[in-house]
Amino acid sequence: MIVRFWGTRGSYPVAHPEMLRYGGNTTCLEVRAGGRCIILDAGTGLRLFGDSLTREAQPPRQFDMLITHTHWDHIIGFPFFAPLFDPTNQLQIYGLQRTQSSLRTTIASALSDPLLPLGLEDLRAELHFHEISENLCFSLGPDVHVSTARANHPYRALAYRIETADAALVFIPDTGPFHTVLFGDERIEWTGQPTANTHDDLQVLAEMRERIVDLARGADWLVYDAQFTDAQYVRFPHWGHSTAAQAREIAEAAGVRTLLLFHHDPHRTDRELDEILVEQQAVATAGLEVLTSYEGLELRKGGL
């Protein structure tokens, strides 16, 4: 398995000299495994990945795109992905099934006038949309297995585990912790204090955390939401993001080998990210490697 990071920011892309080392594009990972080319989220980093494919002698013609959710920072790169304009390419696009709108309709709406001067009908690649649910297991070919769980994020989001005989990658770019706010399909009314959870809500949160830990159990790499500092989380618990410490606690509970802090706050400088990393490395349990994800990072384990 080969994993490449093309976008590591959250919320919106940034371009600033103090943020160049970790990168300014929003979420996108490339995974090569079992003869498949898998894309995790379609943030602005997807454009960079598309450009890189033009330099391959034999670029892939089939892609599997796994979308955690359709907030802007996770799909904004979609219409700028070069392979979409080649009729010899095929994309299988997976995303969370919702009652409000189908995955295809949501993507089509994001591409349509007056937001963009093109639509799905202008794309030349063959597109297939698959609406999936939490707690689902399916395969991409005979050698790549995918599992999902629900993340604690406004209007819901999916977490993914991609596993082969050689390696396991878990991708959880957007989630809040599991003790303060339970997010569903409704807007959280913010009054300065989190809405009190019912007993049933607390039970759902506990079960959600257990499933997230199970999804990440023993993984080689856990890519996890670490957008907030502790001080920021106190101010914005209704945004549905975690702190680096909360990410580390999940990694420790799941016994993963390497935690990669991800979905960096768009205001966070390289120096500040360095400081957060040092803090978490100092308190991590023995056997857990903590890293900060950056554009251009490449992870490898086993064969393809």
Image: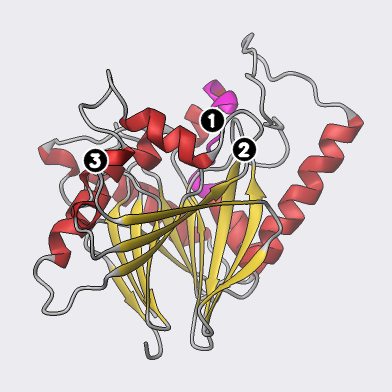
Question: From which residue to which does the magenta span run?
Answer: 235-245
Q: Quadrant of residue 157?
A: top right
Does residue 149 sit above or below 43 in this rendering? below
Could you tell me which residue is drawn at 54 percent across and 27 percent down?
239
On screen, residue 172 versus residue 27, left or right, reads right
Q: Residues within 10 Å of mark 2 (few under 14, many from 20)?
A: many
Could you tell me which residue is drawn at 90 percent across and 32 percent down?
199
On screen, residue 265 versus residue 128, left or right, reads left
Q: Secondary structure at mark 3?
A: helix
Mark closer to the chain start, 1 or 2: 2
Instruction: Report the front residue among 250 and 86.
Output: 86
| Residue 228 in view of the camera | no
Locate residue 34, reporting x and y percent: 43, 83
Does residue 148 sit above or below 288 in this rendering? above
Q: Residues within 10 Å of mark 1 (few under 14, many from 20)?
A: some
Q: Which residue is mark 2?
A: 156
**Quadrant position of the N terminus in the picture:** bottom left
Could you tell me which residue is drawn at 62 percent across and 37 percent down?
156
- Amino acid carrying label 3: it is Asp
Mark closer to the chain start, 2 or 3: 3
Does residue 164 sit above or below 109 in this rendering? below
On screen, residue 128 versus residue 182, left or right, reads left
Label at residue 122: 3
On screen, residue 24 versus residue 199, left or right, reads left
Locate residue 179, reporting x and y percent: 73, 38
Q: Residues within 10 Å of mark 3 (few under 14, many from 20)?
A: few
Q: Which residue is mark 1?
A: 233
Instruction: Report the front residue among 245 and 205.
Output: 205
Does residue 116 sit above or below 287 in this rendering? above
Q: Label 1, label 2: how many angstroms apart (C-alpha)? A: 19 Å
Q: Label 2, label 3: how many angstroms apart (C-alpha)? A: 30 Å
- Amino acid carrying label 1: it is Tyr
